[in-house]
Image (tube, rainbow, N blue to C red):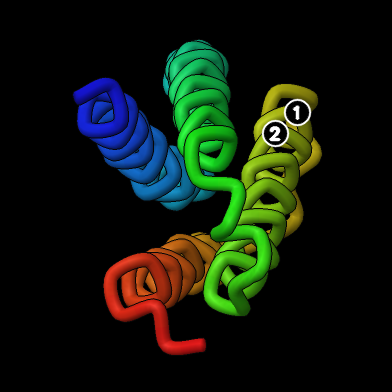
Amino acid sequence: MIYLWLKTFHLVFVVAWFAALFYLPRLFVYHAMTEDRMGHDRFVIMERKLFGMMTLSMGLAAGFGIALLIMNPAWLTMGWIHAKLVLVALLLGYHAYCWKLSRVFARRENQRTHTWYRVFNELPVLLLVAIIALAVIKPF
């Protein structure tokens, strides 16, 4: 029974993390198009607060995921979990890069276009599909 609760909370916080990973770069799209100071200041606050919630969700998703691995150490011998963890590591890098971008915006040093951020916004979708497929299908 505890396994199912751990899995439930892992999935809840993964969903929350991805919601923020999808929304923060979308804020970057609009921020890149903003030219007035009040709009800029508003986006800086929104991005900072969202990043905090995103990081909390990521930490809880990781914590519950680690708990699941502790309950199922045999998974660590399977290829699908190794592939999934590599993709999660890439996602952590994306998360960290979002922090860097938010700091660039806060300093008013953004040099990228809203179009670049629109493409950047789609990257976590690819990782999400691959991670879910690995977790459900367990192909290796």
Residue drawn at (42%, 88%) of the image: 139
Which of 15 and 137 lies nearest the eye of the viewer?
137
Which of 107 and 128 lies nearest the eye of the viewer?
128
Which of 35 and 104 lies nearest the eye of the viewer?
104
Amino acid type at mark 2: Trp
Residue drawn at (69%, 66%) of the image: 86
Which of 84 and 28 lies nearest the eye of the viewer?
84
Residue drawn at (46%, 37%) of the image: 68
Q: Position of residue 45 (x, y in %)?
A: 50, 11
The answer to whether the residue labelled 1 contacts the one labelled 2, judged by CB atoms less than 8 Å apart, is yes
Q: Secondary structure at mark 2?
A: helix
Q: Is residue 26 above or below residue 20?
A: below
Judging by the rendered image, the residue that carries numbered circle 2 is 99
Indicate which disc residue 137 carries.
Answer: none
Residue drawn at (28%, 21%) of the image: 2
Q: Position of residue 53 (x, y in %)?
A: 45, 16
Q: Secondary structure at mark 1?
A: helix
Residue 133 figure quarter: bottom left
Q: Is residue 44 left or right of residue 22?
A: right
The count of marks equals: 2
Mark in front: 1 vs 2: 2
Judging by the rendered image, the residue that carries numbered circle 1 is 103
Q: What whole-number distance in Å separates the C-alpha atoms at marks 1 and 2? A: 6 Å
Q: Position of residue 115 (x, y in %)?
A: 48, 70
Amino acid type at mark 1: Arg
Q: Is residue 83 left or right of residue 6?
A: right
